[in-house]
Structures are given as C-alpha cells and as structure tokens.
Image (cartoon, helix red, strand yellow):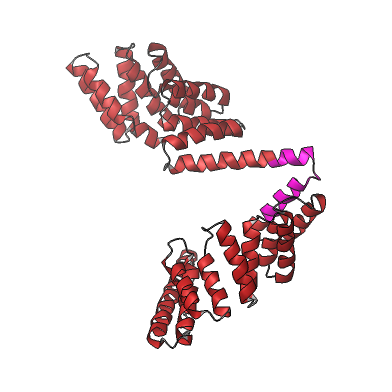
C-alpha cells in the first residue's frame, strides 16, 4: 500500500495547516507527517496516536493513524482507527477506501466491498477506488462485477498498468465462465467446437485446431465463417490444397467473405498463378480497401503476369504504407530490386537490394541482441554470429 499512503501526504499537510488547534499542535502534526513521508512508521504511529488522544474529535488524525497501522500490517488496529474517522466524518476522503483495503487483507470481502462502494459513490472519479472495488470483487469470485468496476477505472485512468492488469484478469475469468457455461448447456454445439479450435489456434496447435473446426463444420456445415477459419489453419500448417478447398466452400456459403477471397488470392500468388491471384486480390480490395499488405501481394501477382511497371507501383505503395508489416516491407524491397533488374534499371535495382540487405541486417542484429539478453540472463555465453548473405 506504500504508494497509496504516500499519495495522501499532500492532503495531510493541508490538514495540519487548517486544523486550528494552535501552533504546538500543528508542529506535532507536521512532525508525524514528515515521519510518515520518510517511512518512519513507528514514530509516525506514536505521534498520531498521541494526537488522537489529545484531540479525539479530529477525524483526519484517526485516518492518518489508520494509514500507518495498515502500512505496518496491523490491520485490525487500522480498521478501528478508520472506523473512528468515519464516525466523525462519514464522507472523509480515502477513509472508506483504506478501510476496504484493510478488510480485504483480512479476507473480509463482503465488508471490503461495502466500504469501497461507499468510496466510489462519494468520489465517482477516483480511479483507485474503482480499481480496488474490482480487486476485491475478484477476490470474492465475482468476475463480472469486477470487470464492470475495472472498466470504469480504466476509463478514468487508461494508462494505469495496475488497472489494466486486473481488468484483463477479470475479463479472462468472465470469458472462461462463459465457455464453461456453454459446455454445461450443450457440450456438442458447434460454438463449443469453435471455441476449442480458436484456443488451439492461439496456442499454435494448428492440427488440433483443424480437427476442432472440422468437428464444428460437421455440426453446422453451412455456418458462415467456419470454413474460412478452417482454411486459415490449413494455410498456417502449409497445407495449401485443403486450404483452397475450405476457402472456396466458404465463398459458396458466403460470397461476401472478403478474408476468404483474399487468402485464396495469397495462395494463388505462392502457386505462381498470376491472373487468378490478381483477380481474387483485386476483388477483395474492392470489398475492403484497407486490407493489410494487399499492395505487396498484388505486386507479386503483377510480376507473375509480366506487368513490371504495375508491379513497381504496387511495391512502392506497400513500402510507403505505414500499416505494412515490417517483414513485408523488407520483402517488397527485394522484389522491387528483381523487377528493376528486369526493366534494366540496374542502379535502381542495386539501391533496392541494398535497402533490403540493410533491413535484413538490422533484423538479424535485433534478433542477436534479444538472444544475447536471454543468454546473459541465464548465464550462458554468446554464440558466434553468422554473416548475412547478399541477396544478389
């Protein structure tokens, strides 16, 4: 809780100035605050305890004493001090939040939820309060309520890493519960098979994903999207013939499936079928002009057709687009060099090949640096690097 406690230091200093109890009292409060800022918790605790005895109606002193006791791990005492502060000033900022944290640490989740809900109702723009409501709801095994609270926290503090971590955890649990519920309701449904296939695909278990998609298709042979997803897994497994069959079946079911059309075009590019690949890729781009890397593959198709000028134009579009994958940019420079050589533009070809080689060398260097960091972290010695080959 150290960061949370320190965030209240400025507020505590303001209290010491406005308490109106005389200069000696202010000095005592200031010293306690300084001790807390310096991490001298025993000293700060003794000072705040003394103040609460001398001025038992001063709510902020009870709050500060509660913060110190909580930081010391003396959560029962912290709860008593924070409850006293709230009896004196029910809307005292931070008191309900830190009361909730102390209750949470004692596994009193219902009491913690009740306390932090008061904090969020009194101070609805406090991202920390919403985060802690989510954390406690997670501990109480209420992931949907946790996700709702953490979504609010994320809107208030979109770059807070702690909030993002807990929010991701909550949504994963919500998804997991939804899938488990699906299995309970209908373990033979095609949606269950699709979920299993997607999980296998994300784990790069492509053969397992293929089997699950095939099972889903047996249960729902005309369901849009399933054949396209199956074709994608075949493509990742480098099984081009069954990938083509699956993607063509998808287009029979859903002629507007742009991904199926585009992926068929990519396969035909790799097969050297210039006319067929160009027709498919151009058709997909008409449906969705923002298809990533489409200019590169269209350039490859134009190369197969011998349309060198059109290929140059397409590769230049791929290189200049900020959305093009870096690996595709690298390959576009190489293909551009090949086309320039065909056009007898030798100087342009040499420049393109040189840029390709530079990008390739930079990529190799980045890979070696990552490997070196891993080896250094594990205590292994670095292996010798191999010299990159010239593409020409």
Tell how many labels.
0
Indicate whether 35 appears above or below 211: above
Residue 105 located left or right of residue 358:
right
Residue 26 located left or right of residue 40:
left
* The stretch drawn in magenta includes residue 197: yes
Residue 343 seen in this snapshot: yes
Residue 327 position, x and y percent, is 49, 69
Indicate whether 297 appears above or below 213: below
Residue 97 position, x and y percent, is 44, 26
Taking depth in this image into account, of 303 and 63 the one nearest to the observer is 303
Residue 110 position, x and y percent, is 57, 23
Residue depicted at x 79% and y 50%: 220
Residue 259 position, x and y percent, is 62, 59
Per the rendered image, the range of residues in magenta is: 179-200
Taking depth in this image into account, of 157 and 349 the one nearest to the observer is 349
Residue depicted at x 41% and y 28%: 125
* The stretch drawn in magenta includes residue 127: no
């Amino acid at each position: 809780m150290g960061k949370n406690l320190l965030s209240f230091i400025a507020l505590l200093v303001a209290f010491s100035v406005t308490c109106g109890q005389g200069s000696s009292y202010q000095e005592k409060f200031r010293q306690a605050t300084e001790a807390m800022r310096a991490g001298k918790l025993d000293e700060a605790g003794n000072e705040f305890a003394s103040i609460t005895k001398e001025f038992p109606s001063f709510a902020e002193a009870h709050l500060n004493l509660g913060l110190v006791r909580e930081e010391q791990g003396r959560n029962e005492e912290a709860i008593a001090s924070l409850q006293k502060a709230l009896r004196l000033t029910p809307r005292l900022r931070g008191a309900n939040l830190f009361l909730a944290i102390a209750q949470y640490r004692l596994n009193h989740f219902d009491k913690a939820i009740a306390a932090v809900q008061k904090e969020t109702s009194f101070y609805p723009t406090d991202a920390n309060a919403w985060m802690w409501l989510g954390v406690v709801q997670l501990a109480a095994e209420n992931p949907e309520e946790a996700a709702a609270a953490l979504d609010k926290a994320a809107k208030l503090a979109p770059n807070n890493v702690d909030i993002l971590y807990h929010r991701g955890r909550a949504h994963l649990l919500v998804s997991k519960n939804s899938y488990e519920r699906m299995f309970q309701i209908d373990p033979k449904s095609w949606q269950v098979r699709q979920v299993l296939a997607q999980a296998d695909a994300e784990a790069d278990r492509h053969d397992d994903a293929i089997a699950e998609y095939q099972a889903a298709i047996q249960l729902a042979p005309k369901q849009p999207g399933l054949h396209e997803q199956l074709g994608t897994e075949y493509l990742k497994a480098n099984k081009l013939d069954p990938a083509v069959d699956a993607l063509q079946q998808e287009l029979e079911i859903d002629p507007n499936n742009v991904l199926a059309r585009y992926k068929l075009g990519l396969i035909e590019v790799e097969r050297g079928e210039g006319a067929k690949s160009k027709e498919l890729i151009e058709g997909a781009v008409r449906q969705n002009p923002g298809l990533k890397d489409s200019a590169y593959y269209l350039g490859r198709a134009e190369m197969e057709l011998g349309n060198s000028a059109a290929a140059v134009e397409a590769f230049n579009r791929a290189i200049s687009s900020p959305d093009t994958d870096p690996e595709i940019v690298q390959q576009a420079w190489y293909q551009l060099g090949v086309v320039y050589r065909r056009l007898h533009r030798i100087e342009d070809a040499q420049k393109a090949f040189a840029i390709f080689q530079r990008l390739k060398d930079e990529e190799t260097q980045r890979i070696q640096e990552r490997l070196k960091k891993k080896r250094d972290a594990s205590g292994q010695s670095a292996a010798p690097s191999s010299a990159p080959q010239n593409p020409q």
